Image: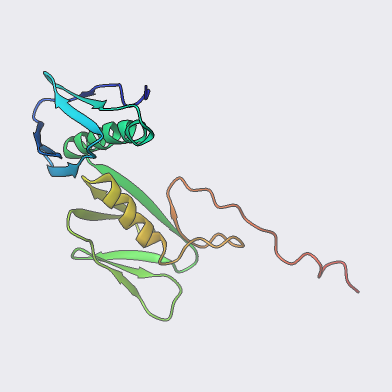
Amino acid sequence: MSRIGKLPVAVPSGVDVTLEDSTVTVKGPKGQLSQRILPVVEVSVDGGQVVVQRKNDEKSGRSAHGLTRTLVANMIDGVTKGFRKSLALQGVGYRVNKAGDVLNFSLGYSHPVSFSPPEGIAFTVEGTNTVHVDGIDKQRVGQVAAEIRSLRPPEPYKGKGIRYKDEVVRKKLGKAGKAGKK
């Protein structure tokens, strides 16, 4: 039995969970999310809790059990609290500013780089070197943060680039053979 999958998901007040065919829809104060579920698992709402059970003990059912429970829990968290990923710009002259909804980056290229938010995503700029990506869909927030990071990923020699707030970049040594030669 899946340790994660067997745990029920508590539905807080103000959140409505509905099941139609093979789709779970969650409505809350921040918005609405829908997710199709696989036919090898069964989702039911029992008095303020969402319970996920698998229909059989095959590998596909076991692997989808915990996944489906986690997806439902993330949807409930998203419509109540939301999700946030923070990115930090590190390097001389690297900065970001917000013009309307669009982020404008100075990343050491010969031109500024603009990034528009997709639907359901909001940006917050703190200072000139921190960007927060906010939204209700955890997967979309992570994807947008990864796309922003890919504009200038951190390089291993000086550590310059865009990194996640909690990311640790392992630095490499430069050329070592130059000091010992005569």
Residue 126 visible in the picture: no
Residue 121 vertical placement versus 32 (above, below):
below
Residue 107 vertical placement versus 134 (above, below):
below
Residue 78 vertical placement versus 181 (above, below):
above
Judged left or right of residue 157, residue 142 is: left
At x 34%, y 48%, the residue is 85
Q: Residue furthest right?
A: 182
Q: Residue furthest top?
A: 47
At x 10%, y 38%, the residue is 21
> In the image, residue 71 lies at what x, y percent?
26, 37
Residue 127 visible in the picture: yes
At x 22%, y 34%, the residue is 72
Judged left or right of residue 13, residue 153 is: right
Q: Quadrant of the C terminus?
A: bottom right
Front in this rendered view, residue 51 or 58: 58
Number of numbered discs on residues: 0
> In the image, residue 157 lies at what x, y percent?
62, 62
At x 21%, y 61%, the residue is 118
Which of the 4 image quarters holds residue 36? top left
> In the image, residue 114 lies at what x, y percent?
30, 71
Q: Quadrant of the N terminus?
A: top left
> In the image, residue 8 lies at what x, y percent?
24, 22
